[in-house]
Amino acid sequence: MEHAGIERWYAVCCKPRQEAVAEENLLRQGFHTYLPRIRIRQRRRGQWIDAVEVLFPRYIFIRVDTLQRSTATVRSTRGAVGLVRFGGQPAVVPDAVMDALRQREDAASGLHEDKRPLFEAGETVKLVDGPLAGMEGIFTEQDGDKRVIVLLELLGKANKVAVSRDWITRAA
């Protein structure tokens, strides 16, 4: 049983790609919100760029004392669908989970960082730009910030070639 004066975290389900709209409107209603975001590398217009995305697509978190304040307005909030419920009851997200999420954020940016490499050693990649465009090879390693080493078969033998990271993509 909940006690008055105890705020808890709840997950709010949002409409697709409407997390920021829901956040803005929940804040406007005075709710304490948390929308974790992550910085990822993605390919756009032939280049690898940093992009910021929602860590949990379609979800945002609110902190509220449900005995002091109704959450009924969440359902009709622009961008939101409603609280995540189990057995008809709003699902409480443990403080420990929320604390762990916040501790994993980068202190300066407030963003989570995607630490996964863009490509794994041994992965088949395709050159989509540069003088060797159209060839497929095997990704071997990252060589600094902007270059990668790819194993390509040239003139009947395997050769390690350093190319711009922007020139490769995953083979289909």
Image: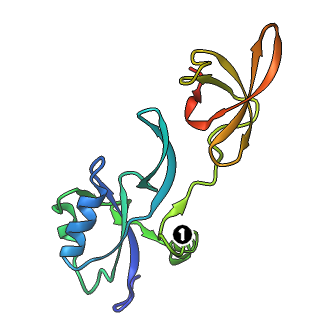
Q: Position of residue 24 (x, y in %)?
A: 23, 67
> Residue pushed farthest front?
131
Three-letter amino acid code at the position of disc 1: Glu
> Residue pushed farthest top?
156
Q: Is residue 90 above or below residue 18?
A: below
Q: Which residue is mark 1?
A: 105
**Quadrant for the N terminus in the image:** bottom left
48 sits to left or right of 159: left
111 sits to left or right of 64: right
**Quadrant for the C terminus in the image:** top right
**Of residues 70 and 155, which is closer to you in this image?**
155
Q: Position of residue 134 (x, y in %)?
A: 57, 15
Q: Is residue 12 above or below residue 155?
A: below
Q: Position of residue 126 (x, y in %)?
A: 61, 22
Residue drawn where x is 70% and y is 21% of the image: 137
**Of residues 111 and 89, which is closer to you in this image?**
111
The picture quadrant where one finds residue 133 is top right
Q: Position of residue 59 (x, y in %)?
A: 37, 57
Q: Is residue 97 above or below residue 88?
A: below
Q: Is residue 136 above or below residue 66?
A: above
